[in-house]
């Protein structure tokens, strides 16, 4: 009997020490993610808005951005979950490693989040040879005025760089990012008209917020498209650790979808 009591007491003490160690380890380990661009993306040789977020129960003080291990900016933050944007203009075509890390209010740094991207070179137009003018006694015909018809499919002209997501909400994962100036065919809208379902240059479809651009054409013909089912997403458990839950609750923080 005495041996059984001693064994039970030892196990209780061991469990308490283990829980304390895990809690201390978590408090000193903030986490960081890169939301855009995605790993493996091919970007044009133009300005790009890098998006990242970091989390720590004690609060985030800043997020640091670097390109090929050279720091290009620090964005001051606050709160347990903080999103930051960092503009970047690549100097030349090539391969780049984008990194981001977050610093907690206590001064601890997270591990680096990485995204390896390729910057493609811009296309160079081939100059055309000047046309040869041949004199003739026959007067040239009168110019014909051609009227450009209104496109049957409405088009979204992006005013700013925008994320294109897998569904009409920030809770959905970012599929790709589209630069300002692009014109995208509109193929649908959500029930409250706050997101457009567009077709991107690669042929795939994704959702862009209506505040990012100006629609051209008859948008009254755009059909309402049912939003795809939302996969699991990350929430904080009572120990302030991220847990993937399915289905995603209405009060979840944005941060990408996940599979439990």
Image (cartoon, rainbow, N blue to C red):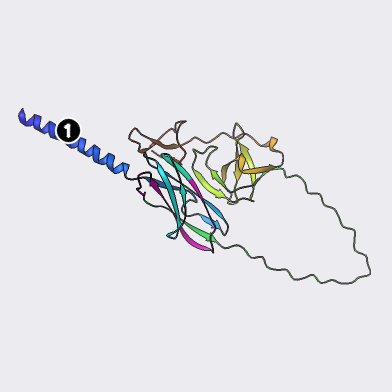
Q: Could you tell whether 62 is left or right of 158 in the image? A: left
Specify start and end residues of the magenta stretch as a single range: 84-110
Q: Could you tell whether 36 is left or right of 12 in the image? A: right
Q: Disc count in the image? A: 1
In x, y percent, where is residue 224? 62, 34
Note whether residue 221 is visible: yes
Q: Could you tell whether 146 is left or right of 242 in the image? A: right
Question: Quadrant of the rendered structure where residue 236 is?
Answer: top left
Residue 101 falls within the magenta-colored stretch:
yes
Q: Is residue 162 above or below residue 91?
A: above
Tag 1's secondary structure? helix
Residue 257 falls within the magenta-colored stretch:
no
Q: Is residue 116 above or below residue 249?
A: below
Q: Could you tell whether 212 is left or right of 239 in the image? A: right
In x, y percent, where is residue 140? 90, 63
Judging depth in this view, the residue of 83 and 74 nearest the camera is 74
Crowd tier of the residue under label 1, counting other residues whose Cα lies within 10 Å: few below 14, some 14–19, many 20 or above: few
Note whether residue 258 is visible: no
Residue beneath the point at 48% across and 35% down: 230
Residue beneath the point at 86% across and 55% down: 144
Judging depth in this view, the residue of 106 and 157 nearest the camera is 106
Quadrant into which the C terminus falls: top left
In x, y percent, where is residue 179? 59, 51
Q: Name the residue at the top extreme.
A: 1
**Disc 1: which residue:** 12
Q: Name the residue at the left extreme.
A: 2
């Amino acid at each position: 009997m005495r041996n059984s009591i001693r064994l039970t007491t030892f196990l209780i003490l061991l469990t308490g020490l283990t829980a304390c160690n895990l809690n201390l380890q978590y408090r000193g380990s903030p986490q960081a993610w890169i939301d855009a661009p995605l790993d493996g993306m091919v970007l044009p040789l133009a300005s790009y808005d890098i998006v990242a977020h970091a989390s720590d129960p004690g609060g985030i003080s800043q997020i640091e951005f670097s390109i090929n291990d050279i720091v290009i900016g620090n964005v001051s933050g606050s709160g347990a979950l903080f999103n930051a944007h960092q503009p970047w203009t690549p100097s030349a075509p090539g391969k780049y490693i984008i990194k981001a890390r977050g610093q907690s209010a206590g001064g601890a740094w997270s591990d680096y989040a990485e995204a390896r991207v390729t910057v493609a070179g811009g296309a160079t137009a081939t100059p055309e040879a000047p046309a040869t003018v041949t004199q003739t006694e026959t007067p040239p015909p009168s110019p014909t005025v051609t009227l450009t018809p209104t496109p049957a499919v409405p088009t979204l002209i992006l005013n700013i760089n925008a994320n294109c997501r897998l569904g009409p909400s920030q809770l959905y994962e970012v599929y790709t990012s589209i630069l300002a100036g692009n014109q995208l065919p509109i193929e649908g809208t959500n029930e409250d008209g706050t997101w457009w379902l567009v077709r991107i240059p690669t042929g795939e479809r994704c959702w862009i917020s209506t505040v990012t651009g100006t629609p051209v054409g008859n948008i009254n013909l755009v059909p309402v498209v049912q939003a795809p089912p939302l996969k699991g997403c990350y929430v904080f458990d009572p120990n302030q650790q991220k847990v993937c839950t399915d289905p995603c609750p209405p009060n979840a923080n944005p941060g990408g979808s996940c599979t439990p």
